[in-house]
Image (cartoon, rainbow, N blue to C red):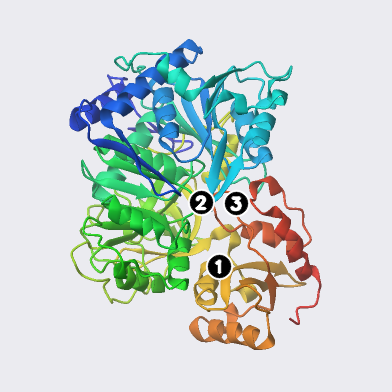
Amino acid sequence: MIADSESGHPSYTSNDDNKTDKAISKANEENNSTDNRAAIISVNETQQPQTLSWQELTDQVSCLQQWLVQCGVTKGDVVAGYLPNTAHAVIAMLATTSLGAIWTSAPPEFGIAAVCERFGQVKPKVVFACAHYQFNGKQYSMAEKNAAVLASLPCVTHVCMIDNAASLTPSSRNSRSSHTCHDWYVTLSQFAPDQIRYCVMGFNDPLYMLYSSGTTGQPKCIVHSVGGTLLNHLKEHRLHCDIHRGDRVFYYTTCGWMMWNWLVSTLASGATLVLYDGHPFYPQGDSLWQMAETLNISLFGTSAKYLEQLEARGIAPINRFQLPDLRSVCSTGSVLNPSQFDYVYRAIKPDVHLASISGGTDICGCFVLGNPLSPVYRGECQGAALGMDVAVHSRGTRAADSTEYTDSGSNTDNDSNTGSGDNTDSGDSKAVNDEGNNKRGELICRNSFPNQPLGFWHDNGEKYHHAYWQSVNGVWSHGDEVMKTRHQGFVFFGRSDATLNPGGVRIGTAEIYRIVNQLAEVIDCVAAAKKTASDEAVILFVQLAPNLPLTTDLQHTICQQLKQQASPRHVPAAIYAVSDIPRTYSGKISELAVKAVINGEEVKNTHALVNAQVLREYTVAQSPSSDH
């Protein structure tokens, strides 16, 4: 590996550029693709699994590859999926990337503007779309969305519809659209399965196009490489997550989140993908755990918010389901609070490996994740990812002086579990640096790593450098506020750009959420800083249980809990009740949008939010009075 001295971006050289062919051939060799073992199991809200064998998967990828060739798709073209989390999306991605084309995707719940902002920048040649999807027991037609999106993409030459091509309305075939519509099943039937022909690819050739949330402007199109993505995912799956051939791996995700890309790579380890399309609590609150029992899932991936909601609803899977094959529970998307560690081991399984992992779309992977060989400490992420010099950078210090990354053989990524039958270690998770002093700052990575993105689409490198390399002495700065613990683990406090700073004391928003969200009256909350004449004030918004008012007593309880469990600095200057918390399409709280609203500033891109209309409720905090 040779690192660019200017940007730190890695450049890999090899005498053999056929990386994709080698990787997939190895997977086929291990998996014996002529057998009938399950490669993909798809489940929706009907709870009726549909299984695709390795042979069936290979055959369908072959047929779709032939159709894409017929459509003129070649190396470097972009193919997009506007699809739910079903086997169709995986098949389309595999057929696309086998030709050296670039795959990008968005889920059907994304609005028209959000999809156009993304696909409009990358100009796909072919689009896969669905006629409808189901969520929380309701059917949603995609006719209007498909028509509007395709009308905005004159670059599209062919559309493959799942269900039937006739579901496209006539308006989607106007003079601006020159695409031809095809039905998925008819298309597959027109070709006979043949040997898949893989395009020769370089390590640093593009594989995926992922997108930033877009909360600060137009979403950035992040380009990920063939070799870097595959190599990193194999490391994370096989070493950090202990995934083996024949395991059944599930992660609750959509095609618009990087965890979908992470999940589908488990095919390279010979594991079976378990895909779920639908609401996590439909038709029953414990439906996903019923699925886990029925399908013998070995790794169950979810979010901290899902686990929080399970506990709030009084659901204890351990009382209803037998989960002998379950070895790992992974959580990501937000900070996993200490009490949630207790819940998992008490209410799900006492000997499971609990791994709270953290990384991002930026690297299509993790900076910290689990280690099945080491203890799990309550409230901590276990350690840094193998091969990554992850450190904590305090402002005013050089990157080289940041908290040292110690023995790479014993450090892995955030919250994980021993998997040895023991519960979490009761050791103190107080964070210290290598000299034994408290250490808190920004998460950085001081070495090059294979899955660094190639850059942003159609960017000369300036925006890419500004996003990750400029703020901390030319090393990768990820934007998370963290502390390193004496166990070589990490504690996360939230995003650095959302950190509160009343009276010069830095407070991570996750510190507030952990305490407030434990109250039975509170469904969720968000905190942001409001500028004052010489300082800033912490403003807290709470989403309460249905029909519950924000009384003076409840406000007092919230303030007392924050004061007692955290500090007087954590007590907000004002508390307001709202009907919902603004979130991005990946489910993350948009603290920056709230901060902009309460300070009377413009929210730069409301299209990035799934519920932007709720921001009107937050203008109440623009009043100079904080006596609430």
Rendered position, 270 above or below 408: above
**x, y (%) of residue 51?**
32, 37
Q: In which quarter of the image is the C terminus?
A: bottom right
Q: Quadrant of the N terminus?
A: top left
Identity, as a three-letter code, of the amino acid under mark 1: Thr
Looking at the image, residue 533 sits to the left or right of residue 311; the answer is: right
On residue 353, the disc is: none
**x, y (%) of residue 199?**
36, 17
**x, y (%) of residue 412?**
30, 55
Looking at the image, residue 374 sits to the left or right of residue 354; the answer is: left
SS at circle 1 = helix
Q: Can you tell which quarter of the image residue 113 is in?
A: top right
SS at circle 2 = loop
Residue in the foreground of this view, choosing between 500 and 349: 349
Q: Mark 3 points at which residue?
A: 584
CA distance separating discs 3 and 2: 27 Å
On residue 509, the disc is: 1
Identity, as a three-letter code, of the amino acid under mark 3: Thr
**Circle nearer the N terminus (1, 3):** 1
Q: Name the residue under label 2.
A: 472
Density class for disc 1 (Cα within 10 Å; few <14, some 14-19, many ≥20) is many
Identity, as a three-letter code, of the amino acid under mark 2: Val
Q: Disc 1, disc 3: CB below 8 Å? A: no
Q: Residue at point 28% right, 41% down?
A: 272
Looking at the image, residue 161 sits to the left or right of residue 150; the answer is: left
Q: Residue at point 35% right, 17% down?
A: 200
CA distance separating discs 2 and 1: 22 Å
Density class for disc 2 (Cα within 10 Å; few <14, some 14-19, many ≥20) is many
SS at circle 3 = loop
**Circle nearer the N terminus (2, 1):** 2
